[in-house]
Amino acid sequence: MESFMDVCPGKSNRRPKGIFMREKLQQEKVQTIMWVAVLAFLGCYFMMLFDFPNVLTILISGVFCLALLIKQQRIRIDFGIGLLTLTNVSYFVIVFGMQGLTMSLLYIGLALYVLGNYLGAEAKIHRNREKIFFWLLLVLVAGHCVHGILNSYLFLDKQWDNGDIRVWLDWWTKFYLPGTAQIVYFLPALAMVFPGIIYFKNRKLFYSVMIVCAAFFTYIAMYSQTRTSVLILPLVFAAQMFLYVILEWKKVKKILSTKQAKITGIVLIVALAAAIFLLKDHPVVKEFMGIMSRDGGILNNIRFKLQRMALEQLFVYPMGGDQMSFMGYPHAHNAWLDMANMGGVIPFFAFVIYTLVTIYELIRWLMKKDIPAERKLLMAGVYGAFFLYYMVERAYESSMHFMTPWFFINGLVHGELTKEK
């Protein structure tokens, strides 16, 4: 049926400009409230505030995903979520039986991936796109830093397990965790060091705090005789430096040709040499350097032998069951291979393919011309820090919460790559 405005001659069906502006302001207000709520939730989760409940995390993530689904009018089911679902479901069913389907840990990784997917797609069309993406990354980094600082306080307070310096209390859970588990909260700060040096002028306060946190966490790792994060820092730093040269080659070439850059390089080398000379006799440094040669050192570390053994036994125990032999060691110290030991080849290969898909998508994302180099270094650094950690630790077996930051980053990347219909 035609309306009065449609048939009345000389009348326009356009809404007055004032009404249109009010509606636009209301929509922006609703969006602002939504983003504040999302950031507050993610900050609480990544901080693990009061040992943030799994079920509550899944429910809140689901509510935000539903709201964004209605707004975007798109169900974001893709190859990545399919592979991650296959990984989690097959693993939990094989390890725990059908009861595994009722466990909240099965769904929490999926919830964070899907939420990251929706948020990435929503942020890329926002008028303050880079600001939104920075805040999403900030709550992840800040949440981990706060948790890491709180746990470090308990370490310095000597809340150790029966005097064992390598195992200390977690602030929220009140469980004793080994240093290899504690350092997962250090990783995002370590990934901020190189971008902090290059882009310090852009965000002076943020990068100052991150560099101080990275230095503090490195000290705690050395004091607690935990080598992993100390090794991850230079690896991520070098990878980000290489990526920066690729992304900004013309700028780098121009900077290196200046006299100021050469002087700065010499000063940094001298400062590093002086720091090594002054700290080499410090008790913490001396003791840490002594344990660097433990278990075969770095290149011949026992963990690599254990991982080779896991690969050799992969099809001996195709259904898992924790039957692999590791020369008396309980684990292979690798997220993928320890998953295979417990859950068999189905979740293992599903997770391997999922990982390859995320690497492919990250490379595609890094090649996009409309994304600033600074954000590329930040996101790739966080991705790489967690990936390296998973290569030498049984993260999936230890706690699903050690995996969810990586799943969330993967979701953000995929969401920004998705072409909207």
Image: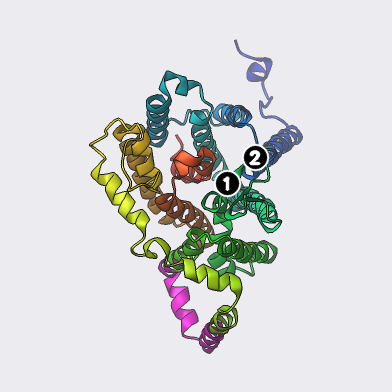
Number of dots carrying numbers:
2
Frontmost residue, 143 versus 250: 143
Quarter of the image with the C terminus is: top left
Query: Residue 102: horizontal and vertical position, in percent?
Result: 50, 21
Residue 338 got which mark? none
Residue 154 screen position, x and y as percent? 69, 52
Left or right of residue 250, residue 149 in this image: right
Looking at the picture, which amino acid does disc 1 mark? Leu
Expressed as whole percent of the image width and height from the top left, the position of residue 144 reads 61, 50
Q: Position of residue 357 (x, y in %)?
A: 36, 44
**In the rendered image, which residue does mark 2 sit on?**
173
Q: Residue furthest top?
A: 1
The majority secondary structure of the magenta stretch comes to helix
Q: From what the image shows, is residue 187 above or below residue 312?
A: below
- Could you say which quadrant of the image residue 40 lies in? top right
Q: Which residue is located at x 65 percent, y 49 percent?
A: 147
Residues marked 2 and 1 touching at CB (< 8 Å)? yes
* Residue behind mark 1: 177
